[in-house]
Amino acid sequence: MSDKPVIAVLVSGSGSNLQAIIDASERGEIPCRVGLVISNKTDAYGLVRAKKHGIPTEVVSHKDFSGREEFDARLVEILRKSGAELICLAGFMRVLTPVFVRAFPNRIINIHPALLPSFPGTHGPRQALDYGVRFSGCTVHFLDEGVDTGPVIVQGVVPVYCDDTEDTLAARILVQEHRIYPMAIRLFFQGRLRIDGRRVMVDGLPRIPEFFHRNPDA
Ligand code: GRF
């Protein structure tokens, strides 16, 4: 067993972000390994993905608990035992209470399919389409006690086209999610992230070339 630091990933569904993280770990692109995958749903495909890579899994159904705090307390108990140094929410469709958030200060990150603070909550791609924005994207952020309100670590941008459906936009965003989630994890374990109020300062961040995108580019 490798002595790399352990991360835990929480999923509720397909787990394609989990897969991107596992792949990045196996390729040595992030200096940690996925030591535990937790799902609140027994049929989450993310559990199958984990098992294919020999990663231990736990199912904790929120339906077995009398309230959100009780559910969160059980998650905290399991995660503490796992020794995970970072907890990654990857399509985990439960709102977590302060019981969870306060147990792991600045050690929980989430991915959201929109450019926060635009379009928090569910159906980010649909909200972006309905609003009519020309660009959307995805955000990896630290978890705080709000819904999708924590300090932003990385964002990726995609264009929104007039003929997009919720599915085509979500698929375009997902491609970027798979790139920025491992990137955020790498920066975390390289010790390059420092939270300063709302802002996450990234140590040694190279400037990206000046760019100008417009959409439509008519
Ligand atoms: C992603 O769009 C993620 O941003 C959102 O839920 C979706 C999960 O996809 N929170 P997957 O389970 O990682 O494939």
Image (cartoon, helix red, strand yellow):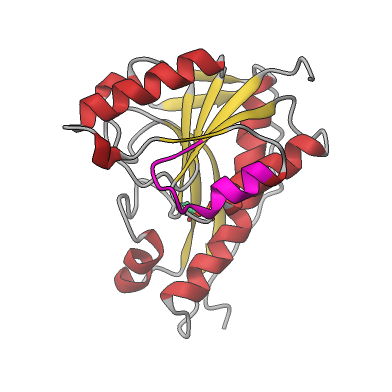
Q: Is residue 110 above or below residue 44?
A: above
Count all numbered tags in the image, as a single digit. 0
**Residues rendered magenta in the picture:** 38-51
Q: Quadrant of residue 54?
A: top right
Residue 47 shows in the view? yes
Who is closer to the viewer here, 109 or 114?
109
Q: Picture coordinates of residue 36 (x, y %)?
A: 58, 29
Residue 208 percent across, percent down from the top left: 69, 44
Q: Is residue 54 magenta?
A: no
Please give the name of the residue rendered at 26% of the width and 34% of the height, measured from the top-left corner: 146
Question: Is 11 left or right of 75, judged from the image as shown?
Answer: right
User: Where residue 172 appears, x then y in whole percent?
Assistant: 57, 67
Indicate whether 93 appears above or below 197. Answer: below
> Which residue shows up at 47% across the image and 80% down it?
164
Judge from the rendering whether residue 73 lies leftward or rightward of residue 166; answer left or right.
Answer: left
Of 79 and 121, nearer the camera is 79
Q: In percent of the image, x 79 and y 37: which residue is there?
A: 26
Q: Nearer the viewer, residue 24 or 200?
A: 24
Q: Position of residue 130 (x, y in %)?
A: 31, 72
